[in-house]
Image (cartoon, rainbow, N blue to C red):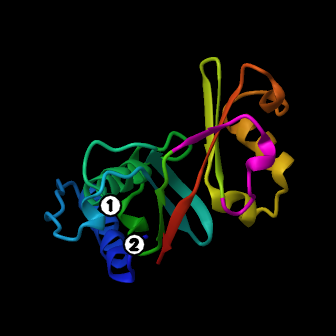
Amino acid sequence: MLTKADAANLLIIAREAIVHQINGGDYSPTPREEKALNERSGCFVTIKQNGNLRGCIGNFQSHQPLFREVAIMAVAAASEDPRFQPMTQDELDNFNLEITVLSPLEKIDDTNQIEVGTHGIYIEKGINRGVLLPQVATDYNWDRETFLQQTCIKAGLPETSWQSPDADIYIFSGQIITE
């Protein structure tokens, strides 16, 4: 669990990384001494404008310290999310950040293990993969089945694919940090 100070530092790092990227400069966050910020944890960085999604990119695993992973994912969310055009300088005064620091993935065989509002879902079936963060189900007031269906749709699969014996379903939790 990250402290309030750790969370604040990650938000600063993410914002600085985005601003530097959009302004055409490289950004390398200053090394951190805080133990939690040096753990190797997966994370997602979500950018919102006026309450609407503007970009979201993340990794489940990291081979580098969390503070660096956050910077990389922030830049990716601002410039590489295929659903959106890269952010521009005009947008720098109007965005909010959300960082979700993830627990490791846990493969499940029983979808009743999914706790809506606590768990995110990651589904793999063939070459298709899809993920929805824990807060998505809460934001849309989805029940477990709808959450599973929407994760399948995100993966480019028919909505009932989660019931297929060759679909692998994983759960994870996350600490959500918001501005």
Disc 1: CA contacts within 10 A as few (<14), some (14-19) or many (>=20):
many
Element class at badge 2 = loop
Taking 129 as reference, is 178 left or right? left
How far from the left and from the top, in percent, is residue 143? 85, 56
Q: Are marks 2 and 1 in contact (CB under 8 Å)?
A: no
How far from the left and from the top, in percent, is residue 60? 46, 44
Q: How many marks?
A: 2
Please tell me whether residue 82 is drawn above or below residue 124 in the rendered image: below
Q: Which residue is mark 1?
A: 18
Q: Nearer the viewer, residue 118 or 138?
A: 118
The quarter of the picture where the N terminus appears is bottom left
Q: Nearer the viewer, residue 106 or 30?
A: 106
Measuring 78% from the left and 62% from the top, which residue is drawn there? 140
How far from the left and from the top, in percent, is residue 164? 80, 23
The reply to whether the magenta stretch includes residue 30 is no
How far from the left and from the top, in percent, is residue 83? 56, 43
Disc 2: CA contacts within 10 A as few (<14), some (14-19) or many (>=20):
some
In magenta, the rendered stretch is: 105-118
Taking 21 as reference, is 95 left or right? right
The numbered mark, 2 or 1, whose residue comes first in the sequence reads 2
| Three-letter amino acid code of the residue under disc 1 | Ile
Measuring 35% from the left and 63% from the top, which residue is drawn there? 89
Q: Nearer the viewer, residue 125 or 95?
A: 125
| Three-letter amino acid code of the residue under disc 2 | Leu
Q: Using the image, tell me which numbered label, if any, was put on residue 6.
A: none
Q: CA distance from mark 2 to mark 1?
A: 22 Å
Taking 55 as reference, is 15 left or right? left
Measuring 84% from the left and 48% from the top, which residue is drawn there? 146
Measuring 78% from the left and 32% from the top, which residue is drawn there? 162
Element class at badge 1 = helix
Q: Which residue is mark 2?
A: 2
